[in-house]
């Protein structure tokens, strides 16, 4: 079997670490793994297949001999270094928002639009975590009857912000429980025992950038520019896994029973929906798992063809690193 030289850019971040784990878990055919990070993290040693690998400082010359570069170091780094990686002959799979909406960059969720991965010109974009888990359940329902409108509210874990936010939730929780003042550094307000209707920056239309990412990316992935979508993104004091309340309106009626049957057959999706035993998707259950979990499937009687769904997935795995590695798997098939 052919093996590939793989690089992870942002190797010491929460998503970069998960990428390294997933490449190993899924036995991706790696010949050589290069771990790249900022000068601050360079020099650390991380393990891959029981071997220590030295983290190198990312530079313009980092991509010589690299076949596949997984980027998870933010949009600024991607904008600067992804074109250099492409020029050096690598396929870039980029987890940032830098290229997602560019017309000649495919935005791919392998269970949803795998065919788009073939159309790349060197860069394939990984969608935002909240978008990925939503389209995983929208797509199979849309295939039954076109979705006209989506109203989504998210409940996003702090790991989506990175390691500093994980430390902040932990530190603030301990402080509050000990009756001490909570130090606020990462978010504009205390996140422990609180929630913040504010993810990424505010835009001129009063939505946040995270909310507009969900709107625009979903339309692109679903291939339906006329789909009406509105989002409210909320940060909650959960460490891992994003949850979403998703309300949809379809052109033709899909009953709750039909929706359950469709979702039970959907790739990468598992239905957890047993009210008698209080079984529904939970963030602490989804953590470390690869599927998107959906439950609380019920008809919205306030409109003619409405459904309500509750969707939960590990934001670092299916929402980021796993989806990127699945794209890499698609690209070498
Ligand atoms: O906050 C979350 O839960 C997800 C965060 C995603 C994120 C954070 C900073 C910059 C992104 C993203 O993936 O869209 C970006 C970005 O690349 O713009």
Image: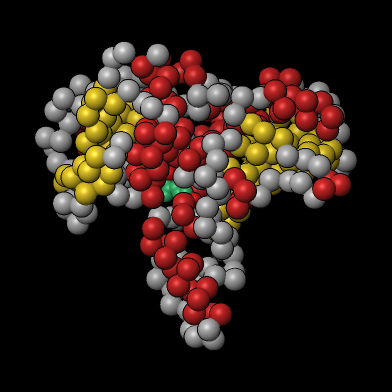
Question: Residue 124 or 291: which is nearer the viewer?
Answer: 291
- Residue 200 at what x, y percent from top left? 46, 54
Quadrant including the C terminus:
top left
> Could you say where residue 237 lies in the image, as x and y percent from the top left?
56, 63
- Residue in front for this viewpoint, 308 or 192: 192
Instruction: Determine the residue positioned at 56% across, 24% down.
Output: 112
In front of the other: 154 or 192: 192
Depicted 224 relative to depicted 54: above or below: above
Q: Give residue 155's position: percent from left, percent from top.
A: 61, 53
Q: Where is residue 185 in the image (x, y as percent from the top left)?
A: 40, 71
Q: In this view, does 315 lie to the left or right of 122?
A: right
Task: Give the number of marks.
Answer: 0
Q: Is residue 35 visible?
A: no
Q: Quadrant of residue 145?
A: top right
Q: Is residue 44 above or below residue 170?
A: above
Q: Residue shown at 68%/20% (left/top)?
A: 143
- In the rendered view, tell whether residue 197 sits above or below residue 264: below
Residue found at the far front of this picture: 50
Residue placed at 39% from the left, 58% from the top?
163
- Look at the image and tell me whether residue 269 can be seen: yes
Q: Horizontal placement of 166 versus 52: left or right? A: right
Question: What residue appears at the point 54 percent right and 80 percent down from the top-left corner?
Answer: 176
Please tell me in which quadrant of the rendered image residue 106 appears: top left
Q: Which of the 4 image quadrants contains residue 235? A: bottom right
| Residue found at the far left of this picture | 61
Residue 73, placed above or below residue 30: below
* 277 relative to 140 in the view: left or right: right
Q: Quadrant of the N terminus?
A: top left
């Amino acid at each position: 079997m052919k093996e590939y030289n793989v690089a992870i850019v942002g190797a010491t971040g929460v998503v970069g670490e998960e990428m390294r784990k997933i490449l190993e878990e899924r036995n991706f055919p790696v010949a050589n793994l290069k771990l790249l990070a900022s000068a601050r993290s360079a020099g650390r040693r991380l393990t891959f297949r029981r071997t220590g690998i030295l983290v190198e400082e990312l530079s313009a010359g980092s991509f010589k001999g690299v076949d596949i570069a997984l980027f998870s170091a933010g949009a600024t780094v991607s904008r600067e270094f992804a074109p250099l990686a492409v020029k050096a002959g690598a396929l870039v799979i980029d987890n940032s928002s830098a290229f997602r909406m560019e017309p000649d960059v495919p935005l791919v969720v392998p269970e949803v639009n795998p065919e788009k991965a073939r159309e790349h010109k060197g860069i394939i974009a990984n969608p935002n975590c909240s978008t990925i888990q939503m389209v995983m359940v929208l797509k199979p329902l849309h295939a039954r009857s076109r979705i006209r409108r989506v109203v989504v509210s998210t409940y996003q874990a702090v790991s989506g912000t990175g390691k500093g936010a994980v430390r902040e939730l932990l530190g603030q929780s301990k402080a509050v429980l000990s009756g001490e003042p909570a130090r606020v550094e990462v978010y504009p307000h205390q996140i422990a025992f609180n929630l913040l209707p504010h993810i990424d920056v505010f835009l001129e239309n009063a939505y946040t950038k995270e909310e507009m990412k969900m709107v625009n990316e979903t339309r692109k992935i679903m291939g339906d520019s006329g789909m009406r979508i509105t989002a409210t993104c909320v940060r909650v004091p959960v460490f891992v896994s994003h949850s979403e309340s998703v309300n949809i309106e379809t052109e033709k009626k899909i009953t709750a029973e039909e929706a359950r049957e469709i979702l039970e057959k959907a790739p990468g999706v598992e239905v957890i929906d047993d009210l008698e035993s209080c079984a529904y998707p939970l963030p602490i259950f989804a953590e470390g798992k690869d599927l998107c979990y959906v439950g609380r499937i019920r008809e919205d009687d306030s409109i003619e063809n409405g459904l309500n769904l509750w969707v939960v997935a590990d934001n670092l795995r299916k929402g980021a690193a796993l989806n990127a590695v699945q794209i890499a798997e698609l690209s070498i098939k």
